Amino acid sequence: MGIQLFMPKFDTEACLEQIRECLDKGWTGMGFKTVELEEKWKEYTGLPNAYYLNSSTAGLYMACDLFRMELGWDDNSEVITTALTFISTNHAIMQAGLKPVFADVDDTLCLDPESVREKITENTKAIMYVGMGGNAGHYYEIVKICKEHGLVLILDAAHMAGARVNGEIPGKEADVVVYSFQAVKNLPTADSGMICFKEKRFDDIARKFAWLGINKDTYARTSAGGNYKWKYDVEYVGHKYHGNSVIASIALVQLDHLDEDNAFRNRVAQMYTEGFAPYSDKIGLVTIPENCQTSRHLFQIIVENRDELLTYLNSKDIFPGVHYIDNTNYRMYDYAKGTCPKAEYYSEHILSLPLHLRLSDEDVQTVIDAVVEFVTR
Ligand SMILES: *Cc1c(COP(=O)(O)O)cnc(C)c1O
């Protein structure tokens, strides 16, 4: 089976117990466990609002749609974003009829505040920031830029469940924070995510928009003092984005393990870091600012001959990954090709090494030895 890039680990018995409650009660849909999870997530993060969705993609799409709709952004509106991300991030901007404007990254693999400043025009409405691999990078510089220029800040925190800066969960400064609980993220479920708006009015709209625009969910109706209000209004042409209680059951259990899981990931990362330290001229590492306690979704190295190394590792039954290919290589974003030289460079030189909770020290050492062997051939 070899050493895989990602492999989630679940507290199976505890998950089944939570799911059993749903089945026994006869409530598998929205409400019940989804509400419990939202409350627990608010408590865990300190964010004022949380709404559970069937994916983080849904959250990013909805964030762009709702801001556009409510803030009156027109077709010329631009959102500054990164080329080094999962495609959801930029599709969210594009599908809302907004224009992704690509700024470059720095050695944290997150957006470079200097590059962002250079991309601001009179049409800029928002900045989409990705905390790459759980590293906050220079997030607070971006917060400052948004304040200075009156821009909306969208934090794609897909990798950031449990990440902290100066000991605190970042995000209170952003207009919205979107987390992913997809199968291989730090808080794994099967598919789901959480959207946390700063303002309650957006959270209120999201709760309708994520269920076809219907203005009262079934749970609220059936718990309204036995008075079944079957009649509902439809306020928006919305989507089917909301989460359900079966998957929320898994999230509730895994949330209890999130901090210990991230600590394990950080220990693996520490082993890699120490193992590669003598080869710093051949194996580059991502800069993690001192105040960042990364969730370590990823451990990325920067090497020459990345593709050859990838093939070599595969031959040794080690299966790394690439996060990510510069998005301006894809046809819908190729108008920006060549505008982000650092993102382009990293896109060709980064490699994500196996990082998950089932790795033994021996596995990690095997990966270190193989990488070192390759670069010192
Ligand atoms: C995984 C990921 C997403 C999408 O998450 P889903 O929950 O699978 O929709 C968005 N942005 C980034 C940076 C991701 O890594």
Image (tube, rainbow, N blue to C red):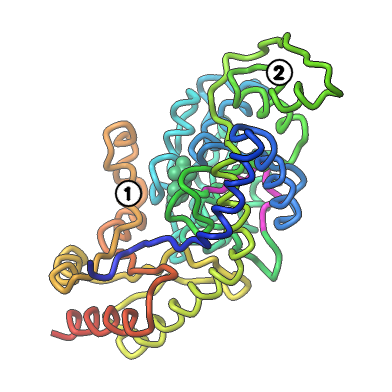
Residue in front for this viewpoint, 177 or 74: 177
- Tell me how far mark 2 sits from mark 1, CA to CA: 40 Å
Measured along the vertical axis of the image, is residue 325 above or below residue 240?
below
- Closer to the camera, 233 or 280? 233
- Name the kind of residue labelled 1 in the image: Asp
Whichever of labels 2 and 1 marks the residue nearer the N terminus, that label is 2
- Coordinates of residue 20 in the picture (x, y in percent): 59, 46
Q: Is residue 26 left or right of residue 268?
A: right
Q: Quadrant of the N terminus?
A: bottom left
Secondary structure at numbered mark 2: loop
Span of residues in magenta: 170-180
Disc 1: which residue: 326
Which residue sits furthest right? 225
Residue found at x 50% / y 25%: 96
Snapshot quadrant of residue 36: top right
Q: Is residue 89 magenta?
A: no
Give the residue at x 49% y 27%. 98
> Which residue is label 2 attached to?
215
- Image quadrant where residue 228 sits: top right
Q: Nearer the viewer, mark 2 or mark 1?
A: 2
Asked which quadrant contains residue 23, the reply is top right
Query: Magenta includes 172?
Result: yes
